[in-house]
Amino acid sequence: MPKVIAPRDPKEWSLFTAGHTACAGCGQSLGARLVLNAAGPRTILVNATGCLEVFTTRFPSSAWRVPWLHSLFENASAVGSGVEAALKALGKADDVNVIVQGGDGGTADIGFGSLSGMFERGHNILYVCYDNEAYMNTGIQRSGLTPFAASTTTSPVGSEVLGNTTGKKDLPAIAVAHGVPYVATTTVAYPKDLEKKVKKALSIKGPKYIQILVPCPLGWGHDTALTIRLARLAVQSGIFPVIEVENGKLTSVMRIARKVPVDEYLKPQARFRHLFTPAGREELARVQALADANIERFGLLGARAG
Amino acid sequence: MKFYPGVPAMPGTSLDNHTGNWRTQKPVFDHAKCTACELCEQYCPEPCILVADDGKFDVDLDYCKGCGICAEVCPFDAIKMVLELK
């Protein structure tokens, strides 16, 4: 007997509202909605420039039901630090969450200096990086978090080079090196894991960092319906390890129940199309080696310890 | 759409943008197959999945962009994407 539940409408319950102008199938809009609804209404959001800022606040409308600020690409963490300091001065720091959010470009490249300063000064802020692996808003340019062999408009495929020649910057490890008390990664394919990590992060005092893999149908060149499946395959193939690091110690990893070859993750994406030509065979083997190295490094396979 | 002098944007006013006209395909929900597992609601990027009066899930076509994620994640095959002819 199917269960029957009371009528409800996201127009009433969601703090992130529909009518934003993200592309169909956008992983980032899903990620932002999950983060905000997990954080609750007593939250102040500071946004770096990027897709998220542009599609949620098309003048004169806003998709946010909480206070939301945007200043520039490079200073989101600095603005967030100021908001937190002001709350402290007003004696309201304990019951208001400050969340700074940005894309991978705003986090790993342009806003990296101010993010590092925010970590170092120890502000009580959660930083959320929506990682879609390139500058999608400005036309799919390569960023510091673009993975190896991905084709973007600034790392195109030609006769000499097959896509991006460098690997993904290990941003979670950089955050851990700052002595940040809580660092985690997750993807939009696991909403319960995402919500749990946001709530856990907000319960901890000090700077926190969460990186969320959000597939982008436009930049990755996949069918809009496959957003969730690709986010899941990125984890199951070992390409994107989902981990949790508390006070410098790896405390949990999402284990892979059935290991998937990277082909399954790469094939639906146009940015990796060249890996399935005779010329790309070597690169494909290198991507598989990178995934295997992740599995080895974090112990993603095998029985749970303890 | 309402303008508020001196205020950049009021909260939640994106609901004024009816993005449903972007769509080429629309999800059709089979209420007999729906078990109200909530997966479509959880994964909708808008969010525009609602619970209808009979307690089964349905879509708000004012905002649905027709991405097809709900049909893809539905484990009971209760959602079909169909070409919308206007």
Image (cartoon, rainbow, N blue to C red):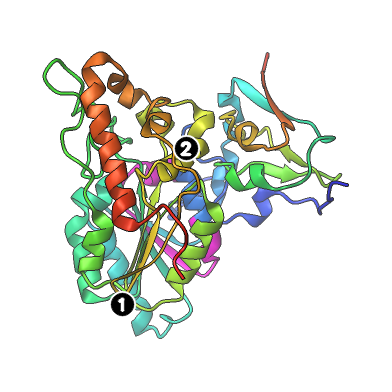
Q: Position of residue A46 (x, y in %)?
A: 36, 60
The type of residue carrying mark 1 is Ala
First reached walking from the N terminus: tag 1 or tag 2: 2
- Locate residue A244: give its quadrant: bottom left
Label 1: state its secondary structure: helix
Say which residue appears at 32% left-offset and 66% top-offset: A80
- Provide the residue span drawn in magenta: A35-60
Say which residue appears at 28% left-offset and 31% top-offset: A140
- Residue A85: give its label: 1
Task: Say if A230 sits above or below A13 in the image.
Answer: above
Would you say residue A58 is visible in this rendering?
no
Name the mark nearer the viewer: 1 or 2.
2
Say which residue appears at 30% left-offset and 36% top-offset: A288
Label 2: state its secondary structure: loop
Q: CA distance from mark 1 to mark 2?
A: 33 Å
- Residue A26: give its label: 2
Task: Say if B49 sits above or below A84 in the image.
Answer: above
**Disc 1 with disc 2 on a shared chain:** yes
Task: Say if A223 sits above or below A92 in the image.
Answer: above
Q: Position of residue A249 (x, y in %)?
A: 31, 71
Q: Chain of mark 1?
A: A
The type of residue carrying mark 2 is Cys
